[in-house]
Amino acid sequence: MAASTQQFKSAGSNLGQTIGQSWSMISGKDIPNYSLLFLDETLTRKRGEHETIFMPHIVLGRSSRCHVRYSDEFRTVSREHASITVDGTNFVLNHNPSASNPTYVNGKPVGGSHFLQNGDEIQLSSNGPKMRFNTSALKTSTIGLTSRIGQAMSQAVKPYKTALLVMGLLLAGAIGLAGYNMYKSGQMEKELIALNEEKVKVDQEIADLIAQGKENSAEMEALKQRKAQIIYRTNTIVQEVDREPTSSAIKEETRKRSLQIRKRNYPFDFRGL
């Protein structure tokens, strides 16, 4: 059955969709899939073997970028001969108009795109290799996590592997940065608590000196200087919280706690309300 909504796309052209579907599979969602039974040997599969395909777009041909790759002994097969694309619940075979020879389904040439049916036989050129398309009832959510990751990554052709590796490195870096920022925010909060405890102690010592009539003593002056240092350091921490590239939730929580400490314990010294 002819399909008018799809057309051939070269290997590496569906990067965004491939990353999205790979992530859906890795995260445990059910994604469309199908299997190919190889009636002729490929570079990676022997005759009679089959492979379940999870990618939304694969290319068949002799190019090193093709997912299903044939050796150069199949000279009638083009470098990128045809592709299979997932279209909702449908699977579409797309013939490459630049290919030197036709693509066949059940012995009939495909002029452009064709909706595949369970059991359809695909052939690349009149004397070329064959494979059988089979729909699959496999629920990818039932596959173990390690297997899901392995299969999703292994089925990404070379351009996708590079992009997914870069994405993985960026993700790991982002997670590491987030972890560091959470740790740093925790350290700031601990310091605020310690400063608050010291502030309470200094205030009590000042009150004791006043009760003893020692308002102008050197000891009183030292305590006032220490109190000023505590206030300055507290203000500095709040400013650091505002500058940190931490998630808004973590930043807001740390800032909220620091403001509560400042309001509660030394309202006359508080700035920035």
Image (cartoon, rainbow, N blue to C red):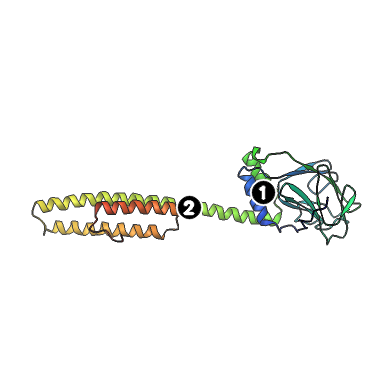
Question: Which dot marks residue 199?
Answer: none
Residue 175 at what x, y percent from top left?
51, 51
> Along the line of sight, which residue is nearer the eye, 185 or 24?
24
Looking at the rendered structure, the kind of residue marked 1 is Met
Residue 150 at what x, y percent from top left?
66, 45
Residue 122 at what x, y percent from top left?
84, 48
User: What residue does disc 2 label?
Assistant: 178
| For residue 21, above or below residue 138 | below
Q: How crowded is mark 1: few (under 14 residues within 10 Å), some or many (20 or more)?
A: some
Residue 4 at what x, y percent from top left?
79, 56
- At x 22% / y 57%, what residue is drawn? 227
Report the number of numbered marks. 2
Q: In whole angstroms, how far apart are the C-alphas of marks 1 and 2?
A: 25 Å
User: What residue does disc 1 label?
Assistant: 153
Looking at the rendered structure, the kind of residue marked 2 is Ala
Q: How crowded is mark 2: few (under 14 residues within 10 Å), some or many (20 or more)?
A: some
| Quadrant in the picture for residue 259 | bottom left
> Along the line of sight, which residue is nearer the eye, 136 or 229?
136
